[in-house]
Image (cartoon, grey):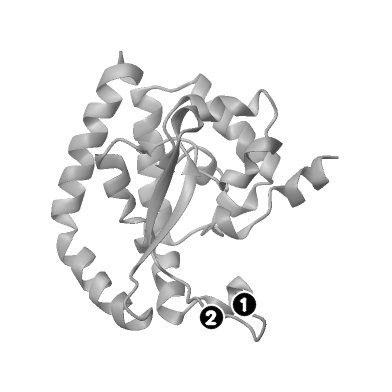
């Protein structure tokens, strides 16, 4: 009952309340990032959602689009702005995902949506992560975050789906708030990493 009905109801009203409550911060960040990122405050990227349905995740933009002399984007570490580094460390860059939740593409809690090009490299067991909506936070994120290997993160995703419940979602949300407030184990964003070098080039 919770998984099929109440989880979505909670997500909808929580995201709506969050957008209203955080609207002053939302507007301030938009204005600052408009200047920092040449009029482009948001970052959009395609990610697989429930049943691998592709959607565009929304985040505050933390990197510039600077390119080298050959037209290639510079390495990520050279494009992260000082303000971008700040909003990442404080997780403020994740706020726009409340919009993804509100329109039903994401959930507050669930497996983090990774890059689309990772899809061919999951095992059959790991594919279970796409049977539920992806989340802003999840079990892997409160169990070590960037300290976990990719295999461990995906194992946590499987564990989450197999034990999905209201109680576990509340525990994960409380642990997330604690980690954000303590700025502990701040995660390197999944889009900046390779899935164990794409599973060692598919063996």
In the image, farthest residue toward the bottom: 69
For the point 54% across and 77% down, the residue is 79
Which residue position is annotated with label 1?
Answer: 74
Q: Position of residue 76 (x, y in %)?
A: 59, 71
Neighbourhood count class around disc 1 (C-alpha, 10 Å): few under 14, some 14–19, many 20 upward? some
Where is residue 168 drawn, in percent x and y? Answer: 41, 28
Which quarter of the figure is the C terminus placed in? Answer: top right
Q: Earlier in the sequence, mark 1 or mark 2?
A: 2
Disc marking residue 66? 2
On screen, residue 37 above or below 199: below
Q: Nearer the viewer, residue 9 or 178?
A: 9
Quadrant where the N terminus is found in the figure: top left
Residue 126 marker = none
Mark 2 neighbour class, 10 Å CA radius: few under 14, some 14 to 19, many 20 or more: some
Q: Residue at x 35, y 42 (%)?
A: 174
Q: In the image, 13: left or right of 147? A: left
Left or right of residue 200, residue 185 in this image? left
**For this rendering, which residue is in front, 192 or 45?**
45
Left of 75 or right of it: where is 166? left
Q: Secondary structure at mark 2?
A: loop
The Cα–Cα distance between marks 1 and 2, rounded to whole angstroms, is 6 Å
Vertical relation: 9 (above or below) 201: above
* Left or right for 64, reference 154: left
At a point 65% along the width and 47% down the height, the residue shown is: 148
Q: Are marks 1 and 2 in contact (CB under 8 Å)?
A: yes
Secondary structure state at the residue bearing disc 1: loop
Check the image and name the residue furthest to the front. Answer: 70
């Amino acid at each position: 009952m919770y998984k099929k009905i109440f989880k979505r109801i909670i997500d909808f009203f929580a995201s709506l309340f969050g957008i209203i409550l955080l609207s002053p911060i939302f507007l301030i960040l938009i204005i600052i990032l408009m200047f920092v990122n040449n009029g482009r405050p948001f970052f959009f990227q395609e990610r697989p959602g429930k049943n691998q349905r592709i959607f565009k995740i929304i985040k505050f933009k933390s990197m510039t689009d600077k390119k080298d002399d050959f037209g290639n984007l510079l390495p990520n570490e050279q494009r992260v702005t000082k303000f971008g580094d700040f909003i990442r460390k404080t997780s403020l860059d994740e706020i726009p995902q409340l919009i993804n939740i509100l329109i039903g593409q994401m959930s507050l809690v669930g497996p983090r949506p990774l890059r689309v090009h990772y899809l061919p490299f999951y095992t059959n067991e790991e594919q279970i992560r796409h049977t539920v909506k992806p989340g802003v936070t999840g079990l892997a994120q409160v169990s070590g975050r960037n300290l976990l290997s990719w295999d461990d993160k995906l194992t946590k995703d499987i564990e989450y789906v197999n034990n999905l419940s209201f109680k576990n979602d509340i525990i994960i949300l409380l642990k997330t708030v604690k980690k954000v407030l303590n700025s502990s184990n701040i995660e390197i964003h999944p889009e900046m990493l390779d899935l164990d070098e794409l599973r060692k080039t598919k063996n």
